Image (cartoon, rainbow, N blue to C red):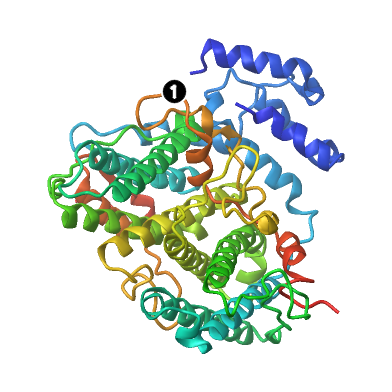
């Protein structure tokens, strides 16, 4: 639903834009977004199973896939910053705070950009992580970042719209920067280790939606499925 | 929300924008039909679709082979740079830095060269030859602004960082061009589009890992932290063009500094907004920077 302030901003812009001479002539459907909006039922959590599906195949599903991962990362780093592990250095605090800020912004960006098509807030489950222990936190952080990079790389070809593909590219390289930092904090020199970068071609590994959601769901109370991409949370 | 400024800006650089989208008048009508279920906040993506359609047919997109040869040219440069540094041994690179950074990166860049040559050959095309390179950025004089690049470790590190950050931007700039070749690629061989795009994104991510690591060695933030007016955060004015545009704060029509931050505030700082999103450079921009400096132009 648009708000009053959005409405007045819109009106101010409309008044001075010549292309809006086309405005108000017809009230037909809006293509991609309206189609997706009509599938809005896909984007509600099923209370019986506490699960959600990414919905119909298409860019909105892929963007929601990214939004789900960013929600998870943001929640994780918010917790890390709120309950720092014992022995954390000031340098580590500064870096992990920066990463938290990036992930929260990624989350907020997808939420704003998807608007009515966004999936709801997911509830994380970090019970497997010991937030007071450095190795546990950094191990989880590396898993989130490396998984995020392989997720974006693996889903790029599923995006139809070049503007969204570019935005995914703008985000994935920042995730890769995070991943390299976290890995170096764990083991210096491991920023492009053979477990994440193919040692023969030096190409980052990519992962399917099914592979990624299987991992992500171990950190989520709200389970995410992508039935139209071959994955249903069990 | 600066949705409408997008059209204004495109009008500035492309006066024919209205002509281009005139065939899409239905869309134009509809983007103003806000009585529909589509929330205003969701519009950036609709706008993206509209412009994609308006420009898709008319722009001249490089072929997949041209894109791969461009990538190969950049990898030749990076690989030549690291191989030359490695050849200097501990006279240039401290042993610990070689172990923790340079050995890995040198291997990666050489692998990228081999991989791209192989892909281009497998497509029945001929990989470009290695360009004539001047690592001092002197266009063949060997006495450019980075004259001590192979004798002064600090200069070597600075150039490494600029190469990696620029490499990330260059690959990012080709994703949309590869997408524009989707039908052509699938016409050559089913699955080729996925293979090429995923490989390009995979190299892009590795360049970003390198960029992060080299920035850590230099004591910089692993991500590019720009100000409102300057993308370049290296302190080297000479490379402003390599970072130009990193100061962008508008993503998909959303000014991301207007989004709430991690500590409950209603706005986000420019530092966070620019660091959280890396920006692309076009082929023309990258070649404009490199030719006549690192790539010798006669």
**Observer able to see residue B24:** no
**Observer able to see residue A212:** yes
Report x, y in % for residue B69.
68, 77
Q: Residue furthest bottom?
A: B87
Q: What residue do we see at 42% from left, 81% from top?
A: B103
Q: Is residue A177 left or right of residue B159?
A: left
Q: What residue do we see at 36% from left, 59% from top?
A: A181
Q: Quadrant of residue B12?
A: top right
Q: Is residue B270 left or right of residue A179?
A: right
User: Where does label 1 land, which residue?
Assistant: B266
A181 versus A9 height, above or below: below
Report x, y in % for residue A195.
31, 73
Image quarter where the N terminus of chain B lies is top right
Q: Secondary structure at mark 1?
A: loop
Q: Is residue B248 left or right of residue B218?
A: right
Q: What residue do we see at 45% from left, 52% from top?
A: B221
Report x, y in % for residue A62.
45, 48
Q: Nearer the viewer, residue B226 or B180?
A: B226
At label 1, counting other C-alpha atoms closer than 10 Å, the crowd grade (few under 14, some 14-19, many 20 or more) is few
Q: Chain of mark 1?
A: B
Q: What residue do we see at 52% from left, 17% from top?
A: A2
Report x, y in % for residue B273.
51, 39
Q: Nearer the viewer, residue A92 or B275?
A: A92
């Amino acid at each position: 639903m648009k708000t009053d302030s959005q409405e007045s901003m819109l009106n101010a812009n409309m008044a001075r834009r010549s292309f809006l001479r086309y405005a108000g002539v017809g009230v037909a459907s809006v293509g991609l977004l309206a189609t997706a909006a009509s599938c809005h039922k896909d984007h509600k959590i099923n209370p019986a199973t506490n699960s959600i599906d990414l919905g119909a195949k298409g860019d909105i599903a892929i963007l929601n896939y990214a939004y789900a991962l960013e929600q998870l990362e943001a929640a994780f780093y918010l917790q890390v910053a709120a309950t720092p592990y014992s022995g954390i250095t000031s340098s580590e605090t500064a870096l992990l705070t920066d990463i938290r800020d990036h992930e929260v912004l990624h989350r907020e960006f997808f939420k704003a950009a998807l608007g009515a098509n966004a999936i709801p807030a997911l509830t994380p489950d970090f019970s497997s992580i010991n937030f007071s222990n450095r190795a546990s936190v950094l191990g989880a952080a590396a898993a989130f970042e490396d998984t995020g990079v392989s997720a974006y790389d693996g889903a790029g070809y599923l995006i139809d719209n070049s503007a969204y593909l570019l935005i995914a590219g703008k985000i994935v390289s920042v995730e890769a920067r995070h991943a390299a930092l976290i890995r170096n904090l764990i083991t210096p020199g491991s920023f492009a280790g053979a477990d994440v970068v193919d040692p023969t071609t030096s190409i980052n590994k990519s992962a399917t939606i099914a592979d990624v959601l299987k991992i992500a769901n171990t950190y989520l109370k709200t389970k995410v499925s992508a039935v139209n991409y071959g994955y249903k949370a069990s | 929300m600066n949705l409408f400024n997008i059209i204004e800006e495109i009008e500035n650089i492309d006066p024919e924008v209205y002509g281009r989208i005139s065939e899409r008048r239905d869309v134009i009508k509809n983007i103003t039909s806000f009585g529909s279920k589509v929330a205003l906040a969701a519009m950036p993506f609709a706008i993206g679709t509209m412009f994609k359609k308006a420009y898709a047919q008319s722009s001249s997109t490089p072929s997949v082979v041209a894109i791969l040869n461009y990538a190969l040219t950049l990898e030749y440069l990076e690989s030549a740079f690291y191989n030359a540094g490695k050849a200097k041994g501990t006279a240039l690179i401290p042993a610990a830095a070689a172990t923790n950074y340079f050995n890995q990166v040198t291997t990666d860049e050489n692998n990228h060269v081999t991989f791209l040559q192989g892909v281009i050959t497998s497509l029945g095309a001929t990989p470009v030859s290695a360009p004539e390179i001047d690592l001092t950025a002197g266009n063949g004089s060997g006495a450019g602004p980075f004259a001590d690049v192979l004798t002064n470790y600090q200069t070597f590190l600075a150039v490494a960082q600029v190469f990696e950050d620029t490499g990330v931007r260059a690959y990012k700039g080709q994703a949309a061009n590869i997408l524009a070749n989707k039908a052509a690629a699938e016409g050559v061989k089913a699955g080729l589009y996925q293979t090429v795009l995923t490989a390009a994104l995979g190299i892009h991510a590795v360049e970003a890992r390198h960029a992060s690591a080299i920035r850590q060695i230099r004591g910089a933030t692993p991500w590019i932290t720009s100000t409102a007016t300057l993308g370049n955060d290296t302190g080297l004015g000479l490379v402003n063009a390599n970072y130009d545009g990193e100061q962008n704060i508008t993503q998909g029509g959303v000014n991301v500094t207007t989004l709430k931050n991690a500590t409950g505030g209603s706005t986000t700082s420019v530092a966070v907004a620019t660091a959280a999103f890396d920006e692309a450079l076009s082929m023309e921009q990258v070649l404009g920077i490199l030719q006549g400096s690192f790539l010798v132009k006669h």
